[in-house]
Image: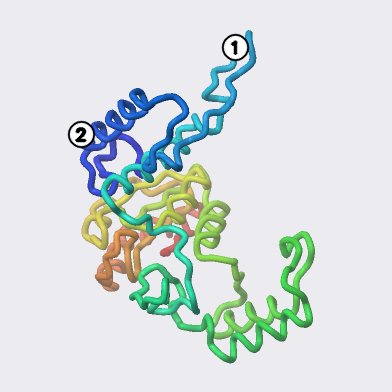
Amino acid sequence: MTEPGTGKHLFGLSPEAKGKLIQRMIDRRATRPSGSAGTADEDAPMAAPGPGAGSTVPSAFLRFDQLPGYQELHLQRAAAAHLGIDLPYFRLHQRVARNTALIGDREYINFASYNYLDLCGHEAVSRAAKEAVDRYGTSASASRPVSGERPYQRELERALAEMHGVEDCAVFVSGWATNVTTLGHLFRGKDLILHDAGIHNSVLQGALLSGARRISFPHNDWQALDGILRREPTPLGCWARAVSASESISGSTRAPSTSGWVRSARPWRAAEGMSPENRRSWSI
């Protein structure tokens, strides 16, 4: 479900069709005899007791079934049921999710996995994981800064740093956490983040957390970015450009022009040499 006013449709429903569906659901409930229930409304929100007599707090703040997010979710389920669409969420996998998945004894092409290198389920990786579980248990019990590290965490980071020829590195539990945490801590209000319009949500959330100014450019359009760099004054702090290197959140897999992205950074890289505050820049 998208936010109102975005122009995006729910399961292909136009705003007009969605409004008619809502009105039909309201009319059907209004005409149903008290205490009866239809099969289409088996997952309808359960009525909860309202606020006590004399309460000045609106019931919308006290009842879970009146929370906007819950009502939107219920509407989504009702729309799917009305259109005969099976909800795609929480499907049960019957084996390791690779480029294919086994669900309900049927094999499907899997577009929803980030097991990119096919290491999940790899014999050597599974064996090492079992050995680590036997020695250290199934949980670190708390974060590394709070509860301390395990040898294999440092060994992994050292190996990755050596492989990439850098001094050190930090491994996060997920790509989403990597972008949110890194951007949220590297940048501040005086900084600027330029990002691909189709960039992953994690980059957007990290930019919002940082408080830095954001400017988006059309997906994989380095010429548009170049124009922004030439128009915008050099930021007082550091700046970063976030590019969808292999795919966008919309599913596009067109690879960006590497030479174009390098050229687009030159106007500000020249300016960076004139001010100590402007010597830091990143490409993500």
Question: Crowdedness of circle 2 by 10 Å Cα count: few (<14), some, many (20+)?
Answer: few
Camera sees residue 34:
yes
Asked whether 123 or 244 is in front, the reply is 123
Of helix, strand and loop, which one carries label 2? Answer: helix
Q: Furthest-bottom residue in view?
A: 124
Residue matched to label 1: 56
Residue at the location (46% across, 46% down)?
236
Using the image, determine if residue 117 lies above or below residue 2. Answer: below
First along the sequence among labels 1 and 2: 2
Residue type for callout 1: Thr
* Residue 116 screen position, x and y as percent: 43, 78
Using the image, determine if residue 56 lies above or below residue 91. Answer: above
Residue 242, quarter of picture: bottom left
**Is 87 on the left-hand or right-hand side of 17?**
right
* Residue 33 screen position, x and y as percent: 40, 25
Residue at the location (57% across, 53% down)?
185
Of helix, strand and loop, which one carries label 1? Answer: loop
**Is 257 on the left-hand or right-hand side of 167?**
left
Residue 132, quarter of picture: bottom right
Asked whether 280 or 201 is in front, the reply is 201
Real-space Cα separation, disc 1 to disc 2, in angstroms:
35 Å
Residue matched to label 2: 16
Question: Crowdedness of circle 1 by 10 Å Cα count: few (<14), some, many (20+)?
Answer: few
* Residue 273 screen position, x and y as percent: 43, 59
Using the image, determine if residue 268 lies above or below residue 160. Answer: above
**Coloring basis for residues:** rainbow
Residue type for callout 2: Glu
Residue at the location (47% across, 60% down)?
90
